[in-house]
Amino acid sequence: MQWRINVTDAQAGEQREYRFLQPCVRIGRSEEAEIHLANRDVSRVHFTLERSGGRVRVSDSSRNGTFLRAGDRWSRLSGDTELELPATLRAGDWTFDVVAEAVEPAADERCLATGGDDLDGDGEVSPWEQSIMLRPGELPTVREAIMVFDLCESSLIASNDDRMAYHLKQRLTQIAEPVLASFKRRFFKSTGDGFLATFADAAAALDAAVALEQRLQQRNQRTRNEPIHYRVALHFGDVWALEAGGSDIHGNDVNIAFRIEGVQADAFEGTVSSLPRRDRILCSRAFLTNVPRERLQAVLSGHVQCGEARLKGITEPVIIHWLRTAYAGL
């Protein structure tokens, strides 16, 4: 299931559509919110949409109120309210048309786990003892730009100074989250020493990666602390989500993005020269072909085709490019 939220700014006369795979979506002034509204009349987290167990609710945490349309009237919400979708909400000058789109597996694809335990002794298997077999092809799938970021050498830094390692991770989060939010990232998940994020299109992901690199390099030049060294991987492909104990995304293309992040010269078929081990942005050809040429020319000083790489756990070789920016090699 995925959210589709059409946001209308009544004052500016603008409309924008958002799609999210995660079950929880925050709307507010905070740059950490999935839908960021830069307006002082909006609370940091104005309201939150959440779906669980087939139900949808909205949680109002604002000072100025969140309103739900019922016919021609608006009613102010208080605390948690169960929603029947589609629904229209209002916060400040914005209205939100909310839809949850789901792709359910066919009935004959569902089956109970063999040998489920009859814990109640009534001849029925309890719901939590049931499993549903879902084929990935039956799950809601979207094509998105995928970004994987890794903080390099964090284990080495931690072995020498664990407080410094913690500081670097916190500083990375402080820098990265507003940058990614400004380019409308759709999914974000911390990986401990980095993060996984997705964007609606490849151009937005490229702009976010370059802006993040710029901020990190500027920070490195100003600070007396340890520099933040990084590796960024960009890929474009299918991702799917399965709500099972948390918010996450899956798919072979997600795996490819993680493998690109850590790739080194020995993974390539031929000799690769000048490939930095860190402080770099690599991408797949699939990503590169989804960025308009004029956008590449605007933000990059060039790109180098490293060649075909054999990535662990990936059947087919992947053509990888090194994206050269103004900060490459610093």
Image (spheres, grey):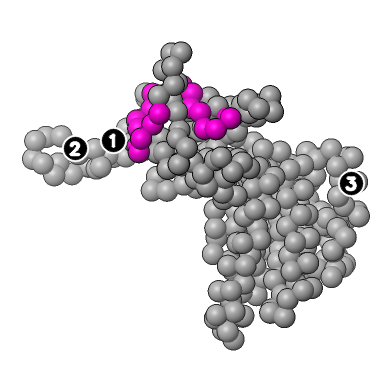
For marks 2 and 3, give the CA distance.
Answer: 60 Å
Foreground pick, 94 / 215 = 94
Q: Quadrant of residue 62?
A: top left
Q: Which residue is mark 3?
A: 298
Q: Is residue 197 magenta?
A: no
Residue 20 to residue 171: above or below: above
Tell me the amino acid under the disc marked 1: Leu
Q: Is residue 61 left or right of residue 161?
A: left
- For label 3, the crowd category at 10 Å Cα-Cα, with few meaning under 14, some 14 to 19 and many 20 or more, is few
Whether tag 2 and tag 3 are in contact, CB under 8 A, the answer is: no
Question: Dot 1: within a 10 Å radius of its alpha carbon, few (fewer than 14), some, or many (20 or more) residues?
Answer: few
- Which mark is drawn over residue 112? 1
Q: Residue at x 41, y 38 (%)?
A: 60
Mark 1 secondary-structure assignment: loop
Q: Residue at x 69, y 28 (%)?
A: 12
Q: State the SS at label 3.
A: helix
Quadrant where the image shows the C terminus: bottom right
Query: The magenta stretch spans which residues?
Result: 76-94
Q: Earlier in the sequence, mark 1 or mark 2?
A: 1
Label 1 close to label 2 by CB (< 8 Å)? yes
> Distance from label 1 to label 2 (Cα)?
9 Å
